[in-house]
Amino acid sequence: RSTRCNQSSCITIASQIITKDFPMKKVKFGQTTKLLLIEEETLFSQGDEGSDAYMIVSGRMNVFVDKKRVGSMTDGEVFGELALLLNQRRSATIVTTTPTELIQITKDDLNRIIDSASEETKKMIMQLCEALSKREEFQKVPFSVDDLMKNLEPENELITKLAKQIFHRLDNSTAHIE
């Protein structure tokens, strides 16, 4: 059973209520770990060590860099992979705007996902991550969306989605320059 309460900021999962007095909860389902967060809860902060990536099952989250809101994420988006793939600290602070359900992706699981890609796609994903992590004024997308899409044709759906999301985030972060 699942209930969401916008004004009182609660969600009900299997008759257990999570309110502002009862923050982030981890729920294990076999090999899958889900995180349940309330509105205005910080998942991690810029500069934190990164040990997991996440996929949003439901909810909405804001992204802050240097305390400035730079974007938002919603259902289906994967994030937190930069810290894992580049062995860096978190590059942003992530805060929920609504009650949010996440699936936790460990570094080993993310590596297995990345290893399922061709060598060329792995290289492209790493180039995108490196460019995105620089956060410089003159970031540049290292290749065209057409080149990426052509390379992703034979890849599995998860790799395709991850690469497209990273490309989109980088492309949006450079849009003010073009």
Image: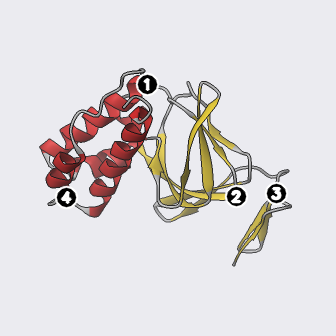
Where's residue 128, x and y in %? Answer: 30, 36
Q: Which mark is residue 19?
A: 3
Circle 3 crowding by C-alpha within 10 Å: few under 14, some 14–19, many from 20:
some
Circle 2 crowding by C-alpha within 10 Å: few under 14, some 14–19, many from 20:
many
Q: Is residue 85 left or right of residue 69?
A: left
Q: Which residue is mark 1?
A: 135
Q: Which residue is mark 4?
A: 155
Kind of residue sitting beneath label 1: Arg
Q: Which mark is residue 166?
A: none
Up the image or down, 130 lies above or below 16; here it is: above
Toward which corner of the image does residue 152 lie, by quadrant?
A: bottom left
Measured Cα–Cα span from mark 4 to mark 1: 28 Å
Up the image or down, 148 lies above or below 126; here it is: below
SS of the residue at dot 2?
A: loop
SS of the residue at dot 4?
A: loop
- In primary-sequence order, the first of circles 2 and 1 is 2
In front: 134, or 30?
134
Looking at the image, which residue is at 82% across and 57% down? 19
